[in-house]
Amino acid sequence: MATEIITQDDLREFKIELLADIKKLLKQNLGTNQKKWLKSYEVRELLNISPGTLQHLRVSGTLPFTKVGGTIYYDFNDIHNMISENKMQ
């Protein structure tokens, strides 16, 4: 069984590709009638990410959220801002 080593350059490239994909998805959805507040499953579908990735974005403070009862809501503008702030030049 071969072992692969993931380098920092690999992770940086993955981040760039992921952010580009997220930005592309957001641009596609900007023309649609977008809701202000999204639930977790909607954010995961929008960004095409796993529950663990969404949790990481939440815990790390990268993506702000609001919790009402047991439901977590995300502001669509915060998602858009997250993408813009992490844009690579």
Image (tube, rainbow, N blue to C red):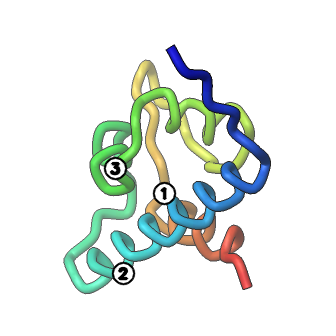
Asked where in the image residue 39 lies, by quadrant, the reply is top left
> Percent x, y for residue 62?
69, 49
Near mark 2 (Cα within 10 A), the count class, few <14, some 14-19 or many ≥20, is few
Q: Nearer the viewer, mark 2 or mark 1?
A: 2
Q: Earlier in the sequence, mark 3 or mark 2?
A: 2
Secondary structure under tag 1 reads strand
Frontmost residue, 2 versus 45: 2
Near mark 3 (Cα within 10 A), the count class, few <14, some 14-19 or many ≥20, is some
What type is the residue that disc 2 sits on? Lys
Count of number-bearing discs: 3
**Residue topped by disc 1:** 75
**Residue topped by disc 2:** 27
Q: Is residue 12 above or below residue 28?
A: above
> Percent x, y for residue 84?
62, 76
What type is the residue that disc 1 sits on? Asp
Secondary structure under tag 3 reads loop
Q: In the visual, does 29 lie left or right of 70? A: left
Q: Is residue 62 above or below residue 2?
A: below
Q: Find the distance from the CA under tag 3 to the CA under tag 1.
A: 17 Å
Residue at 36% x, 81% y is 27
Q: Most extreme residue toward the right, as rendered?
A: 8
> Percent x, y for residue 42?
29, 46
Q: Which mark is residue 16?
A: none
> Percent x, y for residue 5?
69, 33
Q: Earlier in the sequence, mark 3 or mark 1?
A: 3
Q: Find the distance from the CA under tag 2 to the CA under tag 1.
A: 16 Å
Residue at 35% x, 44% y is 44
**Residue topped by disc 3:** 48
What type is the residue that disc 3 sits on? Asn
Q: Earlier in the sequence, mark 2 or mark 1?
A: 2
